[in-house]
Image (cartoon, coloured by chain):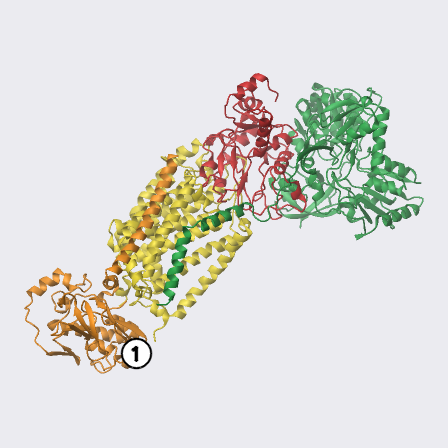
Amino acid sequence: MGFTRRDLLKFSGGSAAGLVFTPVPWSLLHDTALWSENWPGIPQPPQGEVRTRYTTCTLCPAGCGVRARCAGDQPVSLSGVPGHPASRGALCAAGLVGHHLAFCRDRAREPLAHGHPVAIERALAAVTAAIAACGPRETVALFDPRPGRAASFVYRRFLSGLPNAVHCAPADAQPCGPFGVDLENTRAILSFGTPVLDGWLSPGRVLANRSHLRLIQVEAAYSRTASLADVWVPVVPGGEDAFAEAVARALQGGGADERAAEAARLLLQNKPAIALGGGAAVAKLNAILGSVGQPGGFLPRRDFTPATDIATVPDGSIRVLLIEEGSGGRPLSWDLVQRKLVPQNPLVVALTPWLDGCAQHADYIIPAPVYLESLDEAATPAGSVAAGFSLSPALLASPGKLTPPAEFVLRLAQDSASYADVLKDRVTAIRKEGRGSIFTYADAKSTRVAEIASAADLWKAMLGGAVWLDDRLPTATNLRPGALPAPESVELTPAYPLILIAADDPPAHASPLMSKLYRESGLRRPANAAIVHPKTGRGQGLQDGCRAIVSSPSGTFTVQTIFDPAVMPGVIEVAGRTPSAASIRRA
Amino acid sequence: MPDADSQLMPRGVRRSTPRQFLLWILPWAALLAFGLYGAGLCLVKGLNQTHMDNRFAFGLWIFLDLTVIALGAGAFFTGFLLYILKKTELKAVINSAVVIGFICYSGAVAALLVDVGQPLRFWFTFWHPNVHSMLTEVTFCITCYLTVLLIEYVPIVLKNRKLRQIPSFLVFEFELHKLMPVLAGVGTFLSFFHQGSLGGLYGVLRGRPFAFREGFAIWPSTFFLFILSAAAAGPAFILLTTWLVSKISGKRLVRPEVLPLLGRISGILLLPYILLKSIDTLIWINSTSPARGFAAHQFYAWKPFGAWILFAEIVGFGLLPALILLRRRMRESTAWLVFAASLVCLGIALNRFVLTIQTLALPTLPFDPFLSYLPSWQETATFLAVVAYGVLVYSFSFRYLTLFPQEKDLSC
Amino acid sequence: MLSHVIFLGLFYTVLAVLSATLALSACRAARDFKARRVETICWQATFPDLPARERVCRHEFTGEFRHRTCDKAFDCRECQTHAALAAKRPQGAAPPAREVEVFGLDFPLDRFYHRGHAWAHPEPDGTVTVGLDALGARLVTEPEAIELPAVGTHVENNGAAWHVRKRGTRVRILSPVDGEVVATANSPNGWYLKVRPDGGYFDARHLLRGAEIRPWIAREMERLQAALAPAGQPPTMADGGVPMDDIAAGYPDADWDAVCSEFFLQI
Amino acid sequence: MSTTPTETTTKSAARPARYGMVIDLDRCTGCGACMVACAVENNVPPARPEATPRTGITWMRVYKISNGAPFPDTRAAFIPMLCQQCGKDTPCAAVCPQEAVQADPATGIVDQMPQRCLGCRYCMTACPYHARYFNWWDPQWPPGLEKTLNPDVAPRMRGVVEKCNFCHGRLHAARARAAAEGRRELEPGEYVPACVEACPARAIVFGDLNDPASEVARLARDAQSFRILEKLGTEPKIYYRTARSWVRQAAAQTEKESAHA
């Protein structure tokens, strides 16, 4: 009686049936569930004792206080500092994910010469040589996105040692010149295209005062500010001055059209009121409103760093250009730069954390640390009525090989001091002056500088997260705010029948998380979108969503058209463009 | 020397040559393989392979499941009529009905396993059931009923000409067959519940005023409508398949009186269904929907889902076939019979489509747009795989098993 | 909570019913094996699946019915209809050793014929010899193999008695008698089995005899012609009606599997 | 959100909390800070490039709505949408086949348990607010970014549904702190979700709707406050308020033709 195949089958069948009654299959089942819970590829969040550290945001001139929640040494989330004089405990969306910037793509990680790695000494030598070779009519220029910092003083000191050098800055670097805005007491704002509720000054401070502000927004685009303003006055780009004049007339009791009259009425009913924007007309309005030097208006403050608007530098004059690019903010337009450079072999050095923007065209790229990667500073918070200063201690480990722009300039100037020394000197100076008080983030307390024992203590306090604010100046009416250049009016030609204006643009560099959320919620139009009124679009033979080519005197670019009846007819809105005449046609 | 192939076929019936059969099988096998590839992609890479999204969380697959389960209802209902109500004429199609039911349910379950995001957790529903969820009811009943169908399928397989030569198989089959009424009873019970719960699935969606319905006790009206419609569609589908198979194989499979009988059963069930459906719709339009802040007409304001779809469902695919099937003279003509049966099946499909797709396409938030959805090729492939699987299983069963007992007597 | 109980209760009841059904049928199957009812059950399960033309009642041959299909699986011993009709019939004992000759086939009348073409012949010693009738014999002349049951095996009426392999087809011959095999003989023309009937008494009520045989064989021959005729052609016999000794040899391209199944009542 | 001792004592009478929000649509500037803070707090991964607005995960999502009028009469507003934490026969909780959605009676918070979720997405079809999101992809962070994950919240796996849970992690943390100080009840304002904390416009007020003294309860009772799809009878706990009648029209009414003419 042998072991037949039948027996084998019986045996296997029996054992299979028996197996069901053992715990084996069930535990296996359970394991699969566990496995599905920590699926391969799900990262483990960092562990470590949770600590709170403080710093100051340097992504824009607002200088908001930042409280960082850290697991171990790793910041895992940022939030505002309650009671902060400038930010009032708020952070903007970009600020909330500032700690992601270090991990963005297209970071510059080592010094590059035309795309090839180079020793920083070589770069220094090349720049020095180029400066030495400067001709009589050629200038050395340094673009400083945020004048008024200790770094800016380093730049100025360096430039002052050169025959003809110019310290450039963006046009709107210091919106109100040596003045701050006394928002806390302002009752009405007549804004000409200023994004009052969309990043102007310190968002927290503006919004904290929103409830007692009447806002009249004079703007062609129905921007987010316009949508939340009490009154939206759509005017043709370039028509702002005319409207300002009209309001001025109305204020002085003269006749004006209905919209201007209503605006004037609002301003008179809610004093003190101010007008925001460029041009003589706006300056005149402020004079009529008596908003300069008065509570609730523009108040003078001590610090002001005169810097040349790069647009006003004569074309074809810059031989050597050093461009500092911050972690955030709008990048400098290369079209503009090109116009300013000398035709023959100019030298452009980009002191930037990013490989895109102007860096693509620069001869040398000196990688700069991004926000939170190295000790940095924030100058007077935008629009503050008193000079201010705060440190931005690093929260992230610096990947090395990075040179803060100021550091590079110091080495150009053969100055042995480091950027940290410069900041220390600034703090020492503040202590020496003894004016004003510091607000420490951790305990939300204000302390008179005079009461702080030593510069070292002040330094320590500032490193721990604090902002210094100067005492207010006695109000003086004889001052005039430096008027911004008026928005030049656009004259249309048969070739360029439409007006190109800027739509609110997404930041050039942002956390992938933030851009994802904006994209998916449709809260921001894509960067390459051209938004037009359906009538205008059809008039130009376009369809909603089709690809199109926009051409303007300054060049052509392709876009995706979006029809939106909210847009002013005859206008094309494209993110991050300067107003000009333009035409659009189907691609 | 008789070849193994014909050895497996039931005696006394003619089947196509192995060559012809292969030619018939191959394209379907290819389709199945392609579909399995698509499904595999979805399982390995995740459901991003589909075109479903957070707003169209259900898509082609759920529509498929609902439809095939409705069409598969023929199995339980024929079994019910045959074993419980002793309608012996239906012996002629019961085997075929069981096979179809098995195909439909197993296909649906397979599709569901691809459809869920975490197939490994399928058993969680049995472990922590939320008994208040219609889906739990569906899951439990469908798994049970699939087992029932499997048990009903076994005897048919064991009666294969080769297998029956093993005495133990034949004896087991013999004994099992004696207990068929029990299985039929259980099957009927289960089917009533899950067919209903499938309807309840949408009826309970208080967040979707288009689908939400009032009802009795814990069951919304769709619960009962689904049972009735499925019972009506089942026989119609068997009628259709039987006719189709006999056309394709060129054989007479059942006595001439069987198909009209199926048609009559379908018609008898369809008429009350249409009646109740119309009443339910009226109640919904005039009371249920307005009470939740939605004027019913606005559901049909979005192209292409105009009010025509409602009329088509009730009149074109409901009343019309019901009337045809209930007229003896028309039933006598195969053409009318088949036409009406196909209308019934299409009507059921349309009904399930509306409940799945239109429900999800309609916006609920006031500031929200109407959404459209088009399945990805992976989804479509998986869909086709289920179809191909069905055709293959049926073809093999038809070739090697006795699906239509009357065939051998009719064939000479 | 209550809903849980109700719901899960129902679910587990269903599961219980299902498994019980399976278990029950398995047990019954096992019991059948013990009770040696396997062969009978196999026949029971096979009979309904036979084509209607093979299930005609024997009383159709004798013209007592125009159309009647057997519902007792050819076991006339349990059939009241048969009992009634048989009672009417004059029960003269079959005249010994006379032969019926149909289409040149000899059917001795001293034997009882099973519908599966086995004959049974009660011997004086109380045993029953079982063999293949003339038609059956010619269908499986010169078989490739003959598988006879071992002496001592119990054969069931309508159960498999022995197997013959012809042209690759394994044909099972149905036993006309219940009993124990006492002897086997591998002789194609004579008897195959000697069986001692159960209870020592040979009940032949279910077997064909006497006047039934001629109409039966006549009908069988028609079917044979139909079965042998290639599809589509009118049935003809190669030798003008009289089947030759080895029919298989005469029809090399006939589906022998089908033919044998038809006449030996196989599925 | 200051509180007097008497309030706290009344609170400490063991009454279950019913956390809710009032969102002031007239303050919301659509800056998106709430969305960002929410995603950071809850470890929502950045989307794959192939993700669309309909496959991405945004627990908190700011919709832009308009009155549909053309220039210059067009008006726009922003509506932050999140799980509305339905309080009465919660649609999603009722349909989940395996109790992966649970409404906590003690807080009224509707919570999703991703580790039990089957991914059948029935709850998503049940939700009238489209506040539930499915993980269509394996979660993936750009290299380095996974170091910035919030240690208090576990990232979800592919194939499960997730949604806003009022930053449940923060509630647990707050309770732990309270327990450490020997308190059984939370002070008002001790626990706020990330979006509330982050909103620069302070447009979101959060608190216990059961606490009549709380600001959120007061605002919810305000005539300007309303709830979206209130007629569905699911008792959502997110209130919206606006003085602009057209915004209320566009947000509260369900007649869609006008909104999408």
* Residue reaching furthest to the top: D6
**Residue B206 lies in what quarter of the image?**
top left
Q: In the picture, one chain is yellow; tell me its letter.
A: B
Q: Residues within 10 Å of mark 1 (few under 14, many from 20)?
A: few
Write the residue at 26% across / 54% down.
B178
State the green chain: A
User: Where is residue A159 drawn, in percent x and y?
Assistant: 89, 39
- For badge 1, the amino acid type reads Glu
C223 in relation to A571, above or below = below
Name above or below for residue D223 compared with residue C262: above
* Colour applied to chain C: orange
Q: Residue at x 56, y 18 (%)?
A: D7
Q: Is residue C125 left or right of residue A423?
A: left
Q: From the image, which quarter does the C terminus of chain C lie in?
A: bottom left
Chain letter, disc 1 residue? C
Picture layout, residue B99 above or below residue D221: below
Query: Which of the 4 quarters of the picture holds residue A367?
Result: top right
**Residue B327 in view:** no
Q: Position of residue A10 (x, y in %)?
A: 37, 60
- Chain corresponding to red in the figure: D
**Front one among C223 and B351:** C223
B269 or B321: which is nearer to us? B269
Judge by depth and name the residue closer to the eye, B2 or A228.
B2
Q: Tag 1's secondary structure? A: loop
The location of residue D4, given as percent across then percent down, is: 59, 17
Asked if residue A586 shows in the view, the reply is yes
**Which quarter of the figure is the N terminus of chain C placed in?**
top left
User: What residue is pinned by disc 1?
Assistant: C144
